[in-house]
Image: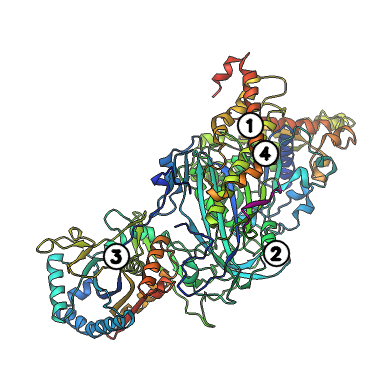
């Protein structure tokens, strides 16, 4: 289709560009148990986050030269458990952040990482998994593939009934593909299916989608997904479903998506975020989006690493 | 069309006879695939006389395919790769004759969900390519029989026509055993219904082939004493009654293969050459095979008896 | 952006990449196993391999749909004609296409740069270079190209397996009823493309009908030709070669005599004219309108067709076959008007 005279729009791929900051700084996740622990719990969280947030800003400024564009975000779980209501939770959250001297630019709902509006984001990302091949992968789909799981290496072979009069294979150790001599093997559950056929995405999988959203790398048929909606109403609704999946609370905020991300989280999130890395390492993101980010970051002297997983960073602070 | 060849016991000549049927249909111009699901003793290569072509199929046969270690099972073009001198010259009007062998040295194995899906993939691909697919199944209530029943009940196979041939020898024990394989609680019919088949339709798709049947009128026995002839006649009648009592009487018999040394001992295809020039095979045997081959697709011979 | 561009993608400034010296692929072509051809909506459903990527649909000059590319990771030796053992790591792209809702193709391909580091890099490095397989050390590309065409040993990179895996996945789609209107054989076309001499245009060095179902093609292409475009050309070659092969076999079939009843409709010699019509009718209904060389071949590669048109003369053979079918039908239609009643 290089002839330019006749064109069919349905026959040509295109990728919408999204505005990008230098850094997307995540100020925290809120789960039901955090909420139930009361405003004091949130206050202590934000107090701990503040110095790290400042450090992240300073680092970005030092690297970028000019004033870096930095946006902050906060994620509320409304996917695994529904609690309270936006009208109650959000004002409290914002008040505690402000008390610690932090501004939440963007507020996201975790269920938006599963389905945003009508777009099945999580399913689309799952369709982009390209498993890291262990040595010896020559094109045959490995029989050991486990639907709904993703590992960072080779699993122990499943004990299968051998052919009659043949020996069953002995146990073999699992092996991390990128291991340095010894393995740290991790097998991540991506989803489970209920008896009614309803699929529940796992927390690490949705967190990986969340990272891709913050990196501006999600597209649906070339269109951007999880586009921030301005907050125009005076208050917040009583139902989570009435809150946009991604809400811009600060009208003067820098763009939501960014070349890199940093998340400040309590250390209990460490296993989840390890899993996020294993997932991100095996996702082929939209090549158009990838090219846009690479080109623009290079032009701004803030070139991103090739590997998407290397664009995300964390600060884990001690405690709950 | 799929034709499954089953038998309750070994020694019925199931493999060699079904291979002959495949050969006859190919001679008549059909494109024919012969699929060796006799997992415990994959020997079809010997019947088609393709030992050379079997080298290198140890890890590429149907065992490996169903277990998922290869995605395309080995295929042997019989006309081209046989070492049988009379087969090598593919007759002008013949269709293709392709053997899908098991792994040399493969054994019986349990079939899981994945293997069933792969089996359906294979049968559907063959269905798109061949007019007739003969599937030779391990004897008895085997995993292979189980898989054939499950595969033909699979939604993806809903438009693929299939028929069953049950081979048995013409003896008391074999008649009872063959009836048992089809009609008892864990037999083909009940097992098929459990897997989603319609009982009437399945029953209408099963026919029997009596193998190694001595023909009292044959010149072979004409030298015997009158007492011997009378005894043979009465045995034959008794067996017919027994068969009818066990619901495998004449109305569900597709054909009768005479007792034939060349099938018993050489276990190979019977060619016109064997009948006409070397005369090591009987004309009646060849005609019986031709007739059964013809009836495989003659709808008048199938359906509810 | 086309994945599989011959220029390695994801380059960071200042980092120079070795040039791509080899592209390779395999195409599987078969009749869609369904009674009715699929319309564009159904084609989009069948080919929608990813929830977030559109199926490319095109209606001019014929109905055509193409799935998004999917990737498969590999880490194994490359086949080579001289026995050299070259380990390579990367991804192979695969996609499926449907022409006129009737002919299904799955096509897998990759490109190889002239050299790579002698160790495996983190997986993320390979994922941002879709359809690129990087060798350890320097690539003896002539030997590897020949090795790929010959087919490797067990355990060496097998691009055909990847094409076949995608085909198997598509054939399991519930849209397909597995009632093909005619019996036909799938074909495989394996191709390699090596760089053309400086300033030379693209050329077909060899097009071989190897075994019954295997064809091999050896190409020379100018540096920088996207691998996806080469794969597109080879899909087109494979489609037309399959059409020729299939129609030739149908015509072969009508010369055959057969003991009735047959498992497929086929006439006996010298009788029953409608049976000839029955055998030829599916070709008319489902195949004859599919001939359209170069419909979607990239501009720069389209001249390659001319070599095949010159010798052996693909379109010439096709026209002869079509004429034979029409002649047969015309002959049988005159005394037997009832032929038209055959479904």
Q: Which residue lies under the disc numbered 4? A: C313
Marks 1 and 2, the one that precedes in the sequence:
2
Task: Indicate the secondary structure of the residue bearing disc 4.
Answer: loop
Q: Which residue lies under the disc numbered 2? A: C143
> Where's residue C10, x and y in %?
46, 68
Task: Indicate the secondary structure of the residue bearing disc 2.
Answer: helix
- Give the spatial CA distance, label 3 vs label 4: 53 Å
- Give the spatial CA distance, label 1 vs label 2: 38 Å
Of residues A297 and C109, the one nearer the viewer is A297
Which mark lies nearer to you, 4 or 2? 4
> Where's residue C243, x and y in %?
61, 38
Of residues A300 and B93, the one nearer the viewer is A300
Which mark lies nearer to you, 3 or 2? 3
Residue at screen point 62% across, 29% down: C322
Marks 4 and 2, the one that precedes in the sequence:
2
**CB atoms of marks 4 and 2 within 8 Å:** no
**CB atoms of marks 3 and 1 within 8 Å:** no
Residue A284 visible from this viewpoint? yes
- Give the spatial CA distance, label 4 vs label 2: 30 Å
Q: Which residue lies under the disc numbered 1? A: C319
Q: Which segment is the magenta one?
A: C199-211
> Where's residue B17, x and y in %?
73, 40
Q: Which residue lies under the disc numbered 3? A: A19
Which image quadrant is residue C249 in? top right
Q: Is residue C108 highlighted in magenta?
A: no
> Where's residue A109, x and y in %?
24, 65
The lab-note entry on whether marks 4 and 2 share a chain reads yes
Marks 1 and 4, the one that precedes in the sequence:
4
Q: Residue furthest front?
A: C199
């Amino acid at each position: 289709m290089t002839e330019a005279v006749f064109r069919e729009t349905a026959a040509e791929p295109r990728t919408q560009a999204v505005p990008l900051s230098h850094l997307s700084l995540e100020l925290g996740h809120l789960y039901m148990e955090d909420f139930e622990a009361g405003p004091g719990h949130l206050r202590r969280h934000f107090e701990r986050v503040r110095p790290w947030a400042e450090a992240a800003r300073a680092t970005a400024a030092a690297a970028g030269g000019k004033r870096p564009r930095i946006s902050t975000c906060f994620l509320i779980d409304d996917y695994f458990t529904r609690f309270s209501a936006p009208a109650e939770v959000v004002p409290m959250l914002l008040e505690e952040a402000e008390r610690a001297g932090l501004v939440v630019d963007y507020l996201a709902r975790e269920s938006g990482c599963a389905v945003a509006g009508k777009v099945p984001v999580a399913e689309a990302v799952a369709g982009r998994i390209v498993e890291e091949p262990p040595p010896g992968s020559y094109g045959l789909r490995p029989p050991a593939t486990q639907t709904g799981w993703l590992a960072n290496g080779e699993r122990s072979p499943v004990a299968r009934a051998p052919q009659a009069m043949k020996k069953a294979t002995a146990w073999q150790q699992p092996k991390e593909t990128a291991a340095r001599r010894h393995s740290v093997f991790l097998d991540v559950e991506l989803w489970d299916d209920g008896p009614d056929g309803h699929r529940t995405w796992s927390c690490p999988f949705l967190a990986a989608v969340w990272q891709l959203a913050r990196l501006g790398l999600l597209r649906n048929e070339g269109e951007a997904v999880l586009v921030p909606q301005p907050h125009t109403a005076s208050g917040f609704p009583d139902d989570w479903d009435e809150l946009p999946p991604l809400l811009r609370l600060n009208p003067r905020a820098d763009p939501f998506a960014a070349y890199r991300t940093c998340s400040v989280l309590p250390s209990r999130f460490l296993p989840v975020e390890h899993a996020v890395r294993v997932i991100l390492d095996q996702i082929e993101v939209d090549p158009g989006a990838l090219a846009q980010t690479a080109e623009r970051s290079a032009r701004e002297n803030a070139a991103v690493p090739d590997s998407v997983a290397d664009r995300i960073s964390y600060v884990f602070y001690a405690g709950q | 069309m799929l034709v499954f060849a089953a038998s309750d016991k070994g020694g019925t000549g199931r493999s060699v006879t079904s291979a002959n049927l495949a050969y006859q249909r190919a001679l008549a111009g059909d494109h024919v695939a012969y699929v060796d699901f006799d997992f415990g003793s994959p020997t079809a290569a010997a019947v088609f006389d393709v030992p050379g072509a079997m080298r290198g199929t140890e890890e590429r046969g149907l065992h490996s395919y169903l277990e998922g270690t290869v995605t395309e099972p080995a295929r042997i073009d019989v006309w081209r790769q046989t070492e049988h001198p009379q087969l090598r010259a593919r007759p002008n009007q013949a269709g293709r004759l392709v053997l899908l062998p098991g792994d040399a040295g493969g054994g019986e194995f349990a079939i899981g969900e994945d293997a069933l899906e792969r089996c359906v993939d294979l049968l559907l691909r063959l269905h798109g390519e061949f007019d007739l697919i003969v599937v030779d199944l391990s004897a008895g209530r085997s995993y292979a029989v189980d898989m054939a029943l499950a595969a033909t009940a699979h939604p993806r196979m809903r438009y693929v026509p299939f028929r069953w041939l049950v081979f048995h020898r013409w003896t008391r024990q074999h008649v009872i055993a063959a009836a048992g394989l089809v009609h008892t609680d864990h037999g083909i019919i009940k097992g098929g219904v459990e897997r989603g088949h319609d009982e009437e339709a399945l029953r209408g798709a099963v026919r029997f082939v009596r193998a190694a049947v001595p023909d009292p009128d044959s010149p072979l026995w004409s030298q015997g004493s009158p007492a011997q002839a009378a005894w043979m006649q009465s045995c034959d009648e008794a067996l017919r009654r027994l068969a009818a009592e066990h619901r495998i009487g004449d109305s569900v018999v597709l054909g009768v293969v005479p007792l034939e040394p060349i099938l018993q001992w050489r276990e190979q295809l019977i060619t016109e050459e064997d009948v006409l020039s070397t005369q090591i095979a009987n004309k009646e045997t060849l005609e019986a095979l031709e007739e059964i081959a013809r009836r495989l697709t003659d709808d008048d011979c199938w359906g509810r008896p | 952006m086309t994945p599989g561009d011959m220029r390695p993608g994801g380059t960071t400034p200042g980092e120079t990449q070795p040039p791509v010296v080899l592209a390779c692929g395999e195409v599987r072509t078969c009749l869609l196993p369904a009674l009715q051809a699929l319309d564009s909506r159904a084609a989009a459903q069948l080919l929608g391999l990813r929830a977030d990527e559109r199926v490319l649909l095109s209606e001019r000059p014929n109905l055509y749909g193409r799935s998004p590319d999917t990737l498969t990771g590999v880490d194994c030796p490359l086949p080579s004609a001289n026995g050299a053992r070259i380990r390579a790591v990367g991804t192979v792209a695969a996609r499926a296409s449907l022409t006129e809702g009737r002919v299904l193709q799955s096509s897998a391909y990759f490109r190889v740069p002239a050299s790579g580091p002698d160790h495996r890099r983190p997986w993320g490095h390979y994922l941002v270079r879709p359809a690129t397989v990087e060798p350890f050390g320097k690539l003896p590309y002539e030997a590897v190209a020949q090795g790929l065409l010959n087919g490797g040993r067990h355990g060496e990179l097998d691009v055909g397996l990847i094409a076949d895996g995608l085909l198997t996945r598509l054939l399991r789609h519930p849209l397909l009823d597995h009632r093909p209107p005619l019996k036909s054989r799938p074909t495989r076309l394996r191709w390699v493309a090596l760089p053309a001499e400086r300033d030379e245009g693209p050329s077909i060095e060899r097009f071989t009908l190897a075994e019954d179902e295997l064809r091999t093609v050896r190409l020379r292409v100018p540096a920088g030709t996207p691998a996806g475009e080469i794969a597109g050309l080879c899909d087109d070659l494979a489609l037309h070669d399959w059409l020729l092969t299939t129609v030739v076999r149908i015509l072969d079939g009508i010369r055959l005599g057969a003991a009735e009843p047959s498992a497929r409709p086929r006439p006996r010699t010298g009788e029953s004219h409608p049976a000839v019509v029955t055998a030829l009718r599916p070709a008319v209904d489902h195949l004859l309108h599919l001939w359209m060389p170069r419909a979607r071949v990239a501009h720069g590669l389209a001249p390659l067709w001319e070599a095949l048109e010159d010798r052996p003369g693909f379109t010439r053979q096709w026209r002869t076959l079509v004429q034979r079918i029409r002649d047969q039908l015309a002959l049988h239609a005159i005394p037997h008007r009832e032929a038209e009643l055959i479904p």
